[in-house]
Amino acid sequence: MKVLRTPEQRFEGLADWPFAPHYADIRGPEGVTLRLAYVDEGPRDGAPVLLMHGEPSWSYLYRHIIPRLVERGHRVLAPDLIGFGRSDKPASRADYTYERHVDWASQWLTGLGLQGVVMFCQDWGGLIGLRLVAAFPERFAGVIAGNTSLPVGAGSNPGFDAWLHMSQTIPVMPIGGILNMGTTRELSADEIAAYDAPFP
């Protein structure tokens, strides 16, 4: 497995992003070690809140929520899923599967030993995060799920099929532009650049 790593300087000076990165080593296929990046802010003994981003975003999505939760005494954790943000990016599309994403997130969660977690998840963060809740219910105190679901093997819908087709055939994916299309306001040029930062 070939693994790409975004240079750290791509994350310097991003708008509204003062958070220091933390890293965990995750076992990948073929004995490859992947580096998963995450935000870990607030008191270590604070009630933990887990923020799970979707696709094609990264934990930058939660830049305004993290400080508000920390102000209320929470320990706030926001991982960058493998392939996104500061986390390592396997180079081949075939390297990414739903089960691998669940496994990588599971390794990270259990490695931290968290208990009493309240998780907020959206989009693919929910498809992956809700599987964590199902696998480790003793670690969670609550779940807030927005614009997501838990697949039950019933097939896909036209919206997902359209996303799948576009994401697999577009020659260059304009991450910031895609996220801007999904917002209720226009993102600033700095915000779009921050969403593009992980993908030079």
Image (cartoon, helix red, strand yellow):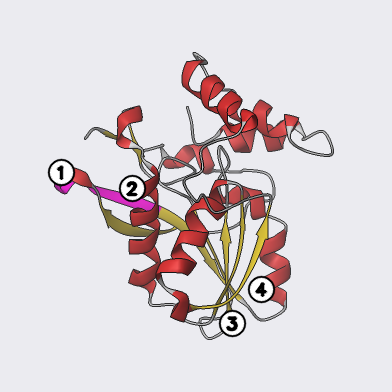
Residue 173, x across and y down, in percent: 54, 22
N-terminal-most mark, 1 or 4: 1
Q: Residue at x 33, y 51 (%)?
A: 35
* Foreground: disc 4 or disc 2: 2
Amino acid type assigned to the residue bearing label 2 in the image: Arg
Q: Residue at x 47, y 39 (%)?
A: 9
Circle 3 crowding by C-alpha within 10 Å: few under 14, some 14–19, many from 20: many
Discs 1, 4 touching: Cβ within 8 Å: no
N-terminal-most mark, 4 or 2: 4
Q: Which residue is mark 1?
A: 30
Amino acid type assigned to the residue bearing label 3 in the image: Ala
Amino acid type assigned to the residue bearing label 1 in the image: Glu
Discs 2, 1 touching: Cβ within 8 Å: no
Q: Secondary structure at mark 1?
A: helix
Q: Residue at x 61, y 47 (%)?
A: 123
Q: Which residue is mark 3?
A: 47
Q: Secondary structure at mark 4?
A: helix
- Name the residue at the bottom extreme: 45
Q: How far is disc 4 from disc 2 in space, using C-alphas?
A: 31 Å
Magenta stretch in the rendered image: 30-36
N-terminal-most mark, 3 or 4: 3
N-terminal-most mark, 1 or 3: 1
Q: Which residue is mark 2?
A: 100
Circle 4 crowding by C-alpha within 10 Å: few under 14, some 14–19, many from 20: some
Q: Secondary structure at mark 2?
A: helix
